[in-house]
Image (cartoon, helix red, strand yellow):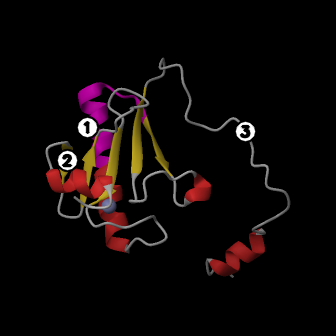
Amino acid sequence: MNACVFCDLIEAGDALVADRPAAAAFLPRSPLAPGHTLVVPRRHVVDMFAAEDEDLAATMQLAREVAGALRDVAGAQGVNLLHASGEAAEQSVFHLHFHVVPRWSDDNFTTWPSGRSGRAGDAAPEHRLRRALELP
Ligand SMILES: [Zn+2]
């Protein structure tokens, strides 16, 4: 038993739908849509801020594979990739994960937020972001 439910799932292995050297995938308990899949790095890492580049790359590569499988097997016409890093972003399980949610043009739901942040002001002006991201 680990302190992390996702590490337990990876270790047990029987719930996985994909297993790669650095990433794994499994179905959530409460799927948003048929085929909704979670993709995680095998190594326990809390969120994207703490992730090593190779864990992120492996997880994204597997997310793409899962998306392709959902298209091929379930007839998905598209996917949404959902992610939260940090409590303020409503992350609920603190093992980095991405939701791959299959979409169909007639599925009658949206994963796009309809509201706007209540945060006032300009928390990250464009010029400060450019400097932080090394764009002159
Ligand atoms: Zn974990």
Residue type pointed to by label 2: Ala
Q: How far from the left and from the top, in percent, is residue 20?
A: 18, 57
Q: Which quarter of the image is occupied by the N terminus?
A: bottom left
Task: For mark 3, give the secondary structure.
Answer: loop
Mark 2 → mark 1, Cα distance in angstroms: 11 Å
Q: Which quadrant of the view contains residue 69?
A: top left
**Highlighted range, magenta:** 64-78
Residue type pointed to by label 1: Ala
Q: How far from the left and from the top, in percent, is residue 127?
A: 76, 74
Task: Name the residue carrying label 2.
Answer: 18
63 over 1 or under it: above or below:
above
Disc 2 Cβ-to-ligand 1 distance below 8 Å: no
Q: Which quarter of the image is occupied by the C terminus?
A: bottom right
Mark 2 → mark 3, Cα distance in angstroms: 34 Å
Checking the image for residue 22, the label placed there is none
- Ligand 1, by image quadrant, is bottom left
112 over 74 or under it: above or below:
below
Mark found first going from the N terminus, 2 or 3: 2
Instruction: Count residues near mark 3 (Cα–Cα under 10 Å), then give few for <14, some for 14-19, many for 20+.
Output: few
Residue occupying image coordinates x 28% and y 26%: 74
Task: Name the residue carrying label 1.
Answer: 69
Q: How far from the left and from the top, in percent, is residue 108?
A: 53, 19
Q: How far from the left and from the top, in percent, is residue 124?
A: 75, 68
Task: For mark 1, give the secondary structure.
Answer: helix
